[in-house]
Image: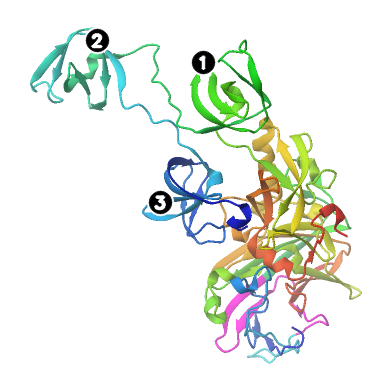
């Protein structure tokens, strides 16, 4: 995806504008079998920062192509031509914890690394995304599992291995973010990561080649 | 999983079943098929066709397929006639009012069959004449409950249990039927069930029979013995045995190798190693609930949207069990960068 051209600029709402929307929108067609892939015909561009369409303000993109967001700021995908929002995601709160309530049983679980990083996340996917990408609604979704997140440490290292058995076992299902968001849905819930670093940036980067990051800890 | 992989054919039937959960009626025989509507728990359904683990039915004028795993046989039909005894000499009238013509008089103490009621009147027949009597002059027949006539065809043993020549423990045993064997139900008497088993036709104490099959659970990752999530099964099994599922791939995420999932494949030669966990009957419900919770599986939510789906699979020996398969959407997402475990064995994943 780094080779594709992408124009990014923020709107007042803090959403992103992509020249061609739908980065990371999963398409599961019969032909694609078990492979999750971005929809054909929908490229996502170079990480060259764009400008705000109205203010001209620069959009900051880190060296891992993650657009930097302030704590609690909404990120997402907007069709530049129509300014229609297709996907939004927001880390509303990030908390470091030494333990969590186990989903099964009455005990508490501890991280296998240093801390649990518990994110409160909101996400939505517009029902009109299927018209945009020309796929059936049932074939489109955005993954929201812990594996879609990564962190960048203070020293600039990227860590993608943020899951663990104990992180998986944290919290009741009703408190957790669903595994996917489908067209027409708005979802919210917690994502539990198992991190070694108590501060840095946490990124939603489902394809591992550029997404959005929010600061945590520190 | 394809039906072909399971080796299961279609059967046209005429069955009455009851839903054991809120159950999705789907357009096809797959959890990826569109959900037409959700049928509430305890709804009686007419099943017209069975293919593999799926049953065809119609609900609210919509036809589709439901998972057979969430159906049980309908209880015996309540007898339409209830026995009553007349407490006086009683007029049998043509209609349900006192002004109606008297057909004949039924003597006090006569046992009659009431086929329906309307207000304070009961419909019955006596000496080949049908009519109505005042319900106030009828009493229940004491000590004679309507005979229950189970309509179930099968039972499953909940332990290794003797099948005997008669319905008492002093009758000779024909042999021991193993735990979880499906037996054909014939009749019941005094807490015993007459059944056809692999040891012959005889009697098994009804307390060792269940009306629903208790499937084992096949596990392949951290739920395996000695692995990090085995604590959910420890002490809850009666038997643990290793077997394989064919036509499945096992995947791990790169750098996240504790997390595994299996997905069906059309390549039958691909196998995954599973441990078949036969759960103690008394622990069965709680064990499955714990496992569902652990895997964040909820049968009442859209299956494609979940991390794991608990589904019936058939091992290479033809035995069915539950297994937690990767949900279709997340599996597609994760397999793009995932590592397929060539051995199919989580313990030999490196």
Q: Quadrant of residue A67?
A: bottom right
| Residue B285 covered by magenta stretch | no
Q: Quadrant of residue A111?
A: bottom right
The label on residue A122 is none
Residue at coordinates 76% horizontally, 68% vertically from top-left? A149
Which segment did they paint magenta? A60-89
Q: Position of residue B136 (x, y in %)?
A: 23, 16
Question: What SS does tag 1 mark?
Answer: loop
Quadrant where the image shows the N terminus of chain B: bottom right
Q: Position of residue A63 (x, y in %)?
A: 83, 82
Q: Reading the chain from its start, which is encountered first: label 2 or label 3?
A: 3
Q: Which of B19 and B240 lies nearest the eye of the viewer? A: B240
| Residue A69 covered by magenta stretch | yes
Q: Which of A122 and A184 lies nearest the eye of the viewer? A: A184
Chain of the residue that carries numbered disc 2 in the rendered image? B
Is there a contact, CB below 8 Å, between mark 2 and mark 1?
no
State how far apart marks 2 and 1 are (Cα).
28 Å
The label on residue B190 is 1
Q: Which of A174 and B210 lies nearest the eye of the viewer? A: B210
The label on residue B58 is 3
């Amino acid at each position: 995806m780094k080779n594709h051209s992408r124009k990014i600029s923020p709107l007042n709402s803090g959403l992103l504008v992509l020249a061609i929307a739908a980065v990371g929108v999963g398409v599961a067609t019969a032909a694609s079998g078990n492979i999750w892939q971005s929809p054909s015909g929908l490229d996502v561009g170079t990480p060259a920062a764009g400008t705000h369409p109205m203010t001209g303000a620069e959009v900051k993109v880190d060296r891992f192509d993650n657009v930097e967001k302030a704590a609690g700021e909404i990120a997402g995908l907007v069709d530049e031509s129509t300014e229609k929002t297709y996907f939004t995601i927001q880390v509303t709160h990030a908390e470091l914890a030494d333990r969590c309530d186990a989903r099964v049983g009455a005990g508490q679980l501890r991280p296998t690394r240093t801390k649990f990083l518990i994110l409160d996340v909101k996400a939505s996917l517009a029902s009109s995304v299927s018209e945009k990408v020309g796929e059936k609604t049932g074939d489109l979704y955005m993954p929201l599992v812990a594996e879609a997140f990564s962190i960048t440490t203070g020293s600039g290292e990227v860590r993608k291995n943020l899951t663990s058995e104990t992180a998986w076992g944290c919290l009741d299902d009703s408190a957790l973010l669903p595994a996917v968001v489908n067209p027409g849905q708005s979802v919210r819930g917690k994502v539990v990561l198992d991190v070694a670093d108590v501060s840095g940036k946490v990124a939603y980067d489902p394809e591992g080649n550029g997404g959005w990051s929010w600061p945590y800890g520190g | 999983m394809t039906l072909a992989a399971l080796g299961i054919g279609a059967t046209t039937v005429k069955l009455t079943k009851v839903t054991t959960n809120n159950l999705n009626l789907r357009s096809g025989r797959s959890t990826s098929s569109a959900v037409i509507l959700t049928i509430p728990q305890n709804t009686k359904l007419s099943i017209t066709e069975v293919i593999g683990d799926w049953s065809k039915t119609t609900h609210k004028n919509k036809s589709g397929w439901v998972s057979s795993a969430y159906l049980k046989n309908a209880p015996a039909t309540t007898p339409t006639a209830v026995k009553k005894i007349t407490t006086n000499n009683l007029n049998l009238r043509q209609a349900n009012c006192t002004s109606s013509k008297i057909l004949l008089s039924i003597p006090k103490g006569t046992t009659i069959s009431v086929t329906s009621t309307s207000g304070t009147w009961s419909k019955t027949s006596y000496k080949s004449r049908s009519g109505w009597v005042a319900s106030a002059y009828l009493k229940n027949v004491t000590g004679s409950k309507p005979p229950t006539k189970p309509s179930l065809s099968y039972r499953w043993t909940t332990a290794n249990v003797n099948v005997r020549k008669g319905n008492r423990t002093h009758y000779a045993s024909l042999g021991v039927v193993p735990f979880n064997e499906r037996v054909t139900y014939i009749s019941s008497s005094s807490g015993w069930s007459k059944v056809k088993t692999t040891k012959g036709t005889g009697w098994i104490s009804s307390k060792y029979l269940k009306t629903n099959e208790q499937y084992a659970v096949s596990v392949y990752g951290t739920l395996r013995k000695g692995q990090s999530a085995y604590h959910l099964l420890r002490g809850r099994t009666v038997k643990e045995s290793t077997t394989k599922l064919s036509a499945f791939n096992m995947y791990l995420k790169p750098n996240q190798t504790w997390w595994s999932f299996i997905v069906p494949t059309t390549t039958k030669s691909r196998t995954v190693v599973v441990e078949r966990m036969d759960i103690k009957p008394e622990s069965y419900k709680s064990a499955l609930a714990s496992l569902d919770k652990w895997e964040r599986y909820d049968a009442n939510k859209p299956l494609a949207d979940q991390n794991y789906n608990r589904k019936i699979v058939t091992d290479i020996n033809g035995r069915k069990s539950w297994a937690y398969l990767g949900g279709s959407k997340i599996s597609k997402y994760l397999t793009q960068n995932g590592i397929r475990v060539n051995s199919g064995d989580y313990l030999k994943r490196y």
